[in-house]
């Protein structure tokens, strides 16, 4: 589990913490890092991704949408277990002028078919773009194609990004919500998922298809409300290790296997969601099935990292903060606020504060907003910390960090001449290599 | 609509704003006031209460639990339309020593049957009290009695208060929730409501009984988390005119008449809940049926008062703050915080700020937490304020304030010798009358 999209995506596909799979930085202490197009690193060949495991079991794997695990060729999805790809390697930021920075390419499998803001437009003034519809049609077509091959299983990773700033929606969804452009984008995604589920039913494979829907980090409150979501009662947002930055709802759908409308909170998901599952199968090492079918993982600890630092740990409904930081005073004074309207003394700190000798302890059941630390002199504090400390010690002593992938940047590695550019006449000439230590301010 | 329990209760039963029905104070500007036992005022004889209307239609009316509309004899529920009463006139604060302050009496109809912390115990150490069970049995018995009288309609106002500090629960519910004593109290109320609904079905009158469940103000964050609830994404809590202080969920249940699982937000409740209702009946003047069956009230404005001041107004999903105030710097510096962990510049102010020449405008759809005011120079601002200003002008020019009931306090009027005390040997001797202007600090 980690804060930023690419790290969360890396974790989703590897089943491993960013500190293990390399999606972090050591350039400075406890920094968020991600994969802009000047990043040199990406997903390591040493990592085993879910599609690679599924491939061995005979699956056909497709990713539609944002990859974000490295845009350089050897990091591409087709090199890491996917058979097909339609989408982009980086965020849809732009437009760029193609002189100092190229626009992000859109790939169809191993070759680019255009660039954002060129062949794949996003109108930043009106917020209009039909990208989600394109991604939807790709998904429906893939499902239809696969359904024809009755005996061949498939894995579709549908990684849309319409709700990431700059937020966009198709014309027919613009101004249809009471929540501005962000709401319009959510409505289009919701509608699209309805169409995907309907297609699974139409093809008669719904009872043989497990669907899981989730997001990769809490709402980016710096973009809210017009370009971002809300974290409800939770503290702060994306970029932080408070619940508003890390906790995500997840919806599992599998007609005939998972009973509808079961609700489970993080930490006791297993027991409750699992009741409708296939309780008798064993699945050592298989995180998702474990969550859905076993109860022993109820108190499996969750480690909250920011860069190379374990900021917090959750055990059951308790969460202990070993470090606190929202962002620096410098950023905050410039108006960058990851906790707008929220300020909990000693918790949402603008200095990196080391609490590791006496962590801040919260009970997320009675205090979901992380606003009232349990007093250190209460018996509950010592009882719970006596339980948590050895879990943290065991974690730290057994941890083997991966080679950090997000340390080096270089304008030379940007998407100047992606594979396929020559056919389209869209190759650009970049500068020579001039690597530097990426600057991650928060 | 108003902030404090008694004012909200007065509004619920009269269908009128506190500024109209007298449940407010003019002792200082924009102050919350309520009905402690030293209050001299209460519900005016000039007000027409829901049970009085129902009585004319042949209903038998019972209140179980907290009255809070005046503890002096002429204010009692049996003088204002109720046929039966089991409960207390004031909050269950205490224990008092009966020398300087008497414990709050519990009434069975027109006579007291004991006092809190004496015959009706609340253990402040363990949080144990069986009061909710007593109130539940009273409710079940009343329903059974009424069900026998087939043709006679009834109205039950079940006003439990276990979730008000000091929070309490029965022994079998203590330590059963993951939310501390507050969660235990919620569970007991939830369980009790289940038993009440089951009794309606058992008696065969469920399809002829309209049930409405709501609360009277947002969670008291000064008591949270151990003695109070959470307001989710909403700003601040009880005592304020932000959404966390004022917005309440409401659940309507009427098998065969209101379709289950319909959801409506405040402001568009009507249209959505109404679809399952009896859309053809007309109900001029009948607020609740209007809400449930008509759509024209979608944009009926909601006025947010604090004492004698209109602090804010809501029209559709827009809310304009004409005044802002959480509480005074003096209180805040003593640690009294109605917005713990929250601080929105220019909004959660510790001075009373007059924005009436340029109200702070929020869109509660895209910004439910009232964190990002719409800029005054945006076209949306002027368009909406041009709509809202005449609504406010019309409201203010037509408003006839009631005689303020919460201005005068007097130790002499406390519950020294309630009716029935002599039989029980529980009459106390109070001091003579010495009225003063009540001090309402926030």
Image (spheres, coloured by chain):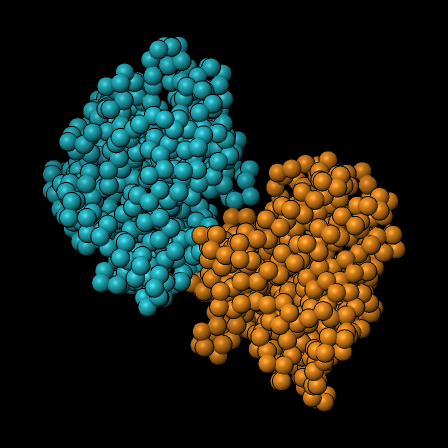
Chain colours: A orange, B cyan
Foreground residue among B8 and B415: B8
Foreground residue among B425 and A187: A187
Please indicate whether residue A80 sits to the left or right of residue A127 in the image. right
Question: Which of the 4 image quadrants contains residue A386?
Answer: bottom right
**Residue B401 at x, y percent in the picture:** 15, 43
* Residue A439 visible in the displayed image: yes
Q: How many marks?
A: 0
Please indicate whether residue A5 sits to the left or right of residue A127 in the image. right
Q: Quadrant of the C terminus of chain A?
A: bottom right
Q: Residue at x 37, y 44 (%)?
A: B267
Q: Residue at x 57, y 53 (%)?
A: A188
Please indicate whether residue A60 sits to the left or right of residue A238 in the image. right
Q: Residue at x 40, y 21 (%)?
A: B209
> Vertically, is A282 above or below B417?
below
**Residue A152 at x, y percent in the picture:** 85, 48
Please indicate whether residue A281 sits to the left or right of residue A316 in the image. right
> Vertically, is A208 above or below B368?
above
Foreground residue among B287 and A110: A110
Q: Residue at x 84, y 47 (%)?
A: A149
**Residue A151 at x, y percent in the picture:** 86, 44
> Vertically, is A385 above or below B413?
below
Question: Which of the 4 image quadrants contains residue B416?
Answer: top left
Q: Quadrant of the N terminus of chain A?
A: bottom right
**Residue B353 at x, y percent in the picture:** 25, 62
> Vertically, is A89 above or below B400?
below
Question: Which of the 4 image quadrants contains residue A324?
Answer: bottom right
């Amino acid at each position: 589990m980690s804060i930023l999209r690419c790290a969360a995506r890396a974790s989703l596909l590897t089943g491993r913490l960013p500190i293990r799979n390399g999606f972090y930085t050591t350039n400075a202490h406890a920094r968020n890092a991600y994969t802009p197009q000047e990043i040199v690193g990406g997903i390591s060949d040493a990592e085993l991704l879910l599609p690679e495991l599924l491939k061995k079991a005979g699956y056909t794997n497709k990713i539609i949408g944002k990859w974000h695990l490295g845009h350089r060729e050897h990091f591409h999805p087709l090199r890491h277990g996917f058979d097909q790809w339609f989408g982009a390697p980086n965020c849809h930021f732009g437009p760029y002028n193609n002189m100092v920075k190229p626009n992000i390419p859109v790939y169809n499998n191993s070759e680019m078919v255009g660039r954002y803001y060129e062949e794949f437009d996003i109108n930043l003034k009106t917020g209009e773009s039909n990208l989600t519809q394109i991604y939807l049609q790709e998904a429906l077509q893939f499902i239809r194609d696969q359904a024809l091959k009755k005996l061949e299983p498939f894995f579709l990773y549908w990684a849309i990004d319409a709700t990431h700033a700059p937020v966009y929606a198709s014309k027919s969804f613009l101004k249809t919500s009471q929540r501005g452009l962000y709401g319009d984008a959510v409505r289009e995604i919701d509608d699209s998922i309805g169409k995907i589920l309907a297609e699974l039913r139409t093809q008669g494979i719904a009872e043989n298809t497990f669907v899981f829907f989730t997001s990769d980090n809490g709402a980016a409150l710096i973009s809210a409300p017009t370009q971002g979501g809300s974290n409800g009662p939770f503290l702060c947002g994306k970029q932080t290790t408070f619940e508003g930055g890390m906790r995500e709802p997840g919806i599992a759908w599998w007609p005939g296997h998972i009973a509808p409308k079961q609700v489970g909170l993080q930490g006791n998901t297993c027991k409750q969601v699992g009741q409708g599952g296939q309780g008798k199968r064993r699945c050592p090492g298989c995180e998702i099935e474990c969550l859905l079918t076993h109860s022993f993982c109820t108190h499996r600890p969750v480690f909250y990292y920011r860069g190379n630092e374990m900021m917090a740990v959750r055990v059951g409904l308790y969460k202990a903060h070993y470090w606190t930081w929202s962002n620096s005073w410098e950023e905050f004074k410039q108006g960058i606020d990851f906790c707008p309207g929220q300020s909990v003394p000693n918790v949402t700190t603008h200095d990196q504060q080391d609490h590791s000798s006496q962590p801040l302890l919260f009970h997320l059941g009675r205090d979901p907003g992380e606003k009232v630390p349990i007093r250190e002199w209460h018996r509950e504090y010592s009882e719970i910390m006596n339980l948590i400390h050895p879990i943290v010690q065991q974690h730290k002593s057994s941890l083997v960090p991966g080679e950090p992938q997000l340390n080096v940047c270089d304008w030379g590695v940007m998407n100047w001449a992606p594979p396929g550019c020559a056919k389209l006449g869209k190759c650009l000439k970049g500068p020579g290599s001039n690597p530097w230590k990426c600057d991650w301010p928060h």
